[in-house]
Amino acid sequence: MINHEEGHELGLMSPVFNVEELNRNALYLIDYEYASYNYRGFDIGNHFAEYAGFECDYSLYPDMNEQYHFFRHYLQPDRPHEVEWRWYDIVWVEFRIWSVISSESQSLVLVPENDLKTLYVEANIYALASHLFWSLWGLIQ
C-alpha cells in the first residue's frame, strides 16, 4: 500500500477557516516527499514512533490501549466503536434424552480481538524497522 511515512505533527494539517470550525474533526496528510509503497505496519509503527517527538521521549509512545483505539479507527473509520447485532443458531444436545433443540442467540460484534492483536504485533515490529530506516537516512544525510 502507499505509505505517507511521515506521520508526525508536521505532516498533518487541520483546516480552520473560522472559530466555528474548531471542533471539526478533519485532518489532511501533507508533505509527501517520503511517501512510498511499503507495508501498512511500517507506516503505523512509524506513526507510533513519532509520538516520542524530536526529543525522543519514549514515555510518550502509545501503550496497548491507545494503540487499540487507533486500530479501531483504522479498521472501521466510519464507526470505530459501533457494534452490530448478529444472530446465531445454537444447537443444544441433551444426551440423556437424545433430543436436539435449536434456539437463537445474539451477540455484539466489535472489531475482532484477533485483528487488534495482529495489528498490534505488526505495528510494533515495523516500528523497529522504522527506527533502522530513519537511522540509515540520517547517516546518508
Image: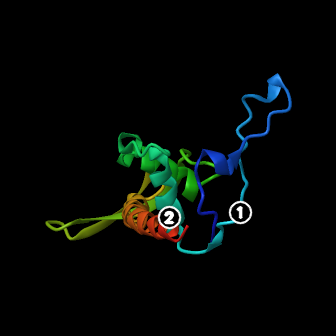
Q: Measuring 43% from the left and 59% from the top, which residue is drawn there?
A: 112
From this viewpoint, which residue is outermost toward the right? 17
Q: Nearer the viewer, residue 100 or 119?
A: 119
- What residue type is disc 2 on? Gly
Q: Is residue 110 visible?
A: no
Is 14 left or right of 93, judged from the image as shown?
Answer: right
Return the residue nearer the eye: 58 or 68. 58
Judged from this view, the residue extending furthest toward the left is 96
Q: Nearer the viewer, residue 79 or 103?
A: 79
**Residue name at image x 56 percent, y 75 percent:** 38
Q: Residue lying farthest top?
A: 19
Residue underneath mark 2: 138
Q: Nearer the viewer, mark 1 or mark 2?
A: 2
From the viewer's side, name the closer residue of 54 and 99.
54
Q: Amino acid at mark 1?
A: Tyr
Residue at left offset 64%, top offset 66%: 34
User: In the image, is 90 to the left or to the right of 37?
Assistant: left
Residue 32's disc number: 1
Residue 76: percent from the left, percent from the top?
59, 55
Q: Residues within 10 Å of mark 1 (few under 14, many from 20)?
A: few
**Image location of residue 109, percent across then percent down:** 47, 53
Residue 27 figure quarter? top right
Q: Secondary structure at mark 1?
A: loop
Is residue 9 visible in the rendered image? The answer is: yes
Question: Is residue 133 shown left or right of residue 102?
Answer: right
How many numbered marks appear?
2
- The image quadrant where one finds the C terminus is bottom right
Residue 140 has which mark? none
Q: CA distance from mark 1 to mark 2?
A: 18 Å
Q: Earlier in the sequence, mark 1 or mark 2?
A: 1
The percent position of residue 15, horizontal first and vertical second, equals: 79, 39
The quadrant of the rendering that contains the N terminus is bottom right
